[in-house]
Amino acid sequence: MSRLIPTIGLEVHVQLKTRSKMFCACPVEFGAPPNTHTCPVCLGYPGALPVMNEEALKMSALTGLMLGCSVPDVCKFDRKNYFYPDMPKNYQITQYDRPICSGGAVPLHDFAYPKDAQKHITHSGKSVRLTRIHLEEDVAKSQHFETSTGIDFNRAGTPLMEIVSEPEIESPEEAFAYLTSLQQILIYGGVSDADMEKGQLRCDCNVSVRPEGQAELGTKIEIKNMNSISGVRRALAYEIERQTDAVSRGEALIQSTRRWDDAAGRTYQMRTKESAHDYRYFPDPDLLPVKTTVFMPEVHSRRPELPGEKRERFVREFGVTGYDASVLASDHELANYFDAAVKGASKPKSVANWVINDLLSALSAAGKSIAECPVSASELAALVSLIDDGTISGTQGKTVFAEMFQNGNPAAKIVEEKGLKQESNTAVIEALCMQVIEANPKPVAEYRAGKLQSINFLKGQVMKLSQGKANPNTVGESLLRN
């Protein structure tokens, strides 16, 4: 049998970062006590009428703009009919044939892939095309107990975007990169916090395998409600292997829906799905079609600098490496911090090194986010400036930074209080070097005889004599002259 090729399509559900729900004024708040943010509209009481959330429409259009989608002049809402306990009206208000966005693509930049896969990227620079983005209301949340299930309707009615990809993702690693890149773009646009642990971004995976060279896709298996990007990668790897083994044995796969058990490391069948459900879509009679042209000028004004654009600018303007730029741009707040810290810096690369190596390490050790950082961007820039102009050494800089991080004091104040100012006066350093040369004739003779490493001993003696305050570069130059 010829090699089997996997094909993956992703349906990503994104909760929008609005203050209120899609069709009522109930607040959107994660972690509120169950069933405290409800009203007759989101509970589906007879006669209650929906009122559209304009901000949710703008955020959806902005998402489309960021992803290169086309936004039609008019979109509309439909009713999708089904009977589940998590949808009190027994229908969901969604979009069917005239969604708010169509087309577009998600770029898979190299550093969005898992670290262990970044050296083996099959299609560097690939973009995964989108079918559509439609806007709908979220359903309630089911909470399963030992002998019963509770329904929390706080989530019912939350504005929810569904971003549907074309089936052209070829590996679990590409799916990982797709979700990482998409998540970054959503956060940059301020349309969602996209926190998978809070259910703000959820993913359904459609995966099939087919013989190499065959155009027709294999039998589609759906994996529902994935709640972590690394979990999606693991689930797809397992499911591709499972399907490949089954087909290789001559087993016929049946279209079905499965769930992923991360602890067990395998998928389990939930139900078979031999044909699509008849949801009996029809236009919602309570909601008029939407003229997007009314708010698109505002949406265009809200388009941010995207992660890929920011990476390119960091490399172009500040001379950082592609890897450094990817780290700095991977977090929107971190990127803003770096932008502020590097403003007016004589050596932007030095600022980048301090942010990536020292600042991020300190934040990680303290369990803090960049938003909680006790060292402001301007103070980090001041510290780097003190090092670059020779006021303090790099080693002293690390001591100063540790105290800045601990108590929030400015770098200049710490340097002054601790007497850490580096000695760069050439005459003073010359005198120290002459003392060391006179006191250590043996290593001096060894150096002059060709044992070049002896100079390091002499440098150490000068630094010791100066109590660590002598400028190491000036020390080296002075020793070589004498």
Image: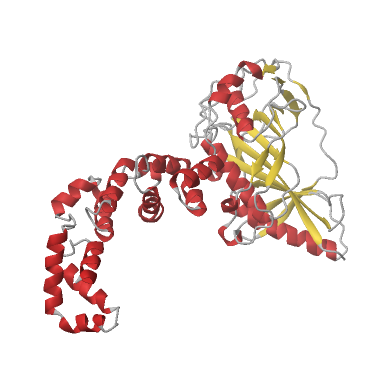
Residue 118 or residue 258, whichever sits in front: 118
- Residue drawn at the location 79% of the way across and 64% of the way down: 245
- Check the image and report above or below for 39 versus 13: above
Residue appearing at x 57%, y 32% in the figure: 16
Q: Nearer the viewer, residue 482 or 261?
A: 482
Number of labels in the image equals 0
Residue 150 on image: x %, y %: 59, 39
The front one of 85 and 310 is 310
* Residue 261 x %, y %: 64, 55
- Give whichever of 253, 412 is nearer the camera: 412
Q: Is residue 440 visible?
A: yes
Q: Is residue 27 above or below residue 317?
A: above
What colouring method underlies this structural image? secondary structure
Residue 324, position as x, y percentages in the image: 47, 52
Check the picture and name the quadrant holding the C terminus.
Answer: bottom left
Residue 438 position, x and y percent, is 12, 77
